[in-house]
Image (tube, helix red, strand yellow):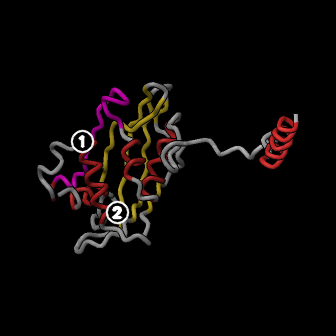
């Protein structure tokens, strides 16, 4: 009887001390990769795309692009005419893996305390075409890449045309067209950056 009383007293103290029955603060929902939002709309893909560049996150960057495994659609890139002239043959077999290698090469040349920045001239909700399963985003861009490589500019300007598609309730970029700046032939397009870091 004494042992039973002692056990009950110990259990009571333990339960009160551990506060088993109080409500705890809930944890925030797990969004998977840091800063990556589930791409349930075309606009969210653009947000993820910009944030991946700013955050120097290659996993999030590449997750914005289509592939046949995840999205049932190959990714394709069409470089600017300027880059095709300066780097003939460089983009003949350009694919999602090329994007990843190039992006990682760019990131490796940026010091830890520096951040790249991408700005579009249009709102991320402003599409040229938007249907239930596809979208086309067309905008001027300004890209700042504070890399440490010599003889390569750090500012890139041009026009981007992104085709986005929906597959399995997830949007992704299936086609990326880079267009040189028509206003100033001295400005460098994004394609020049890619060609410079793709070796």
Camera-side residue of 131 and 75: 75
Q: Which residues are magenta?
A: 66-84
Camera-side residue of 186 and 144: 144
Q: Answer with the quarter of the image where residue 192 lies.
A: bottom left
Residue lying at 12% horizontally and 52% vertically, measured from the top left: 88
> What is the distance, in whole Å, between disc 2 and disc 1 at their CAs?
21 Å
Measured along the vertical axis of the image, is residue 133 above or below residue 66? above
Magenta stretch secondary structure, dominant: loop
Residue lying at 35% horizontally and 67% vertically, measured from the top left: 155
Magenta region includes residue 75? yes
Relative image position of residue 175 (x, y in whole percent): 33, 38
For the question of whether residue 45 can be seen, the reply is: yes
Q: Which mark is residue 156?
A: 2
Measured along the vertical axis of the image, is residue 44 above or below residue 115? above
Residue lying at 38% horizontally and 37% vertically, measured from the top left: 163
Camera-side residue of 191 and 108: 108
Camera-side residue of 16 and 132: 16
Reading the image, the residue beneath label 1 is 95
Count every numbered label the image shows and give the total.
2
- Residue 110 as seen in the image, left or right of residue 23: left
Mark 2 or 1: the one toward you: 1
Q: Determine whether the residue tagged by mark 1 lies in a helix, strand or loop.
A: loop
Magenta region includes residue 17? no
Q: Residues within 10 Å of mark 1 (few under 14, many from 20)?
A: some
């Amino acid at each position: 009887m004494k042992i039973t009383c002692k056990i009950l007293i110990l259990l009571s103290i333990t339960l009160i001390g551990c506060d088993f029955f109080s409500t705890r603060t809930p944890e925030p929902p797990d969004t998977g990769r840091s800063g990556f939002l589930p791409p349930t709309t075309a606009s969210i893909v653009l947000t993820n795309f910009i944030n991946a560049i700013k955050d120097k996150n290659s996993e999030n960057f590449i997750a914005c692009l289509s592939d046949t495994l995840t999205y049932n659609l190959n990714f394709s890139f069409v470089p600017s005419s300027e880059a095709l002239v300066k780097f003939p043959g460089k983009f003949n077999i350009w694919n999602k893996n090329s994007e990843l290698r190039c992006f990682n090469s760019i990131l490796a040349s940026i010091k830890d305390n520096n951040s790249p920045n991408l700005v579009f001239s249009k709102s991320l909700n402003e599409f040229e075409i938007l249907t239930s399963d596809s979208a086309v985003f067309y905008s001027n861009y300004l890209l700042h890449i504070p890399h440490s490589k010599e003889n390569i500019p750090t500012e890139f300007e041009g026009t981007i045309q992104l085709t986005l598609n929906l597959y399995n309730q997830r949007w992704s970029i299936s086609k990326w067209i880079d267009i040189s700046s028509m206003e100033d032939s001295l400005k460098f397009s994004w394609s020049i950056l890619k060609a410079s870091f793709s070796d």
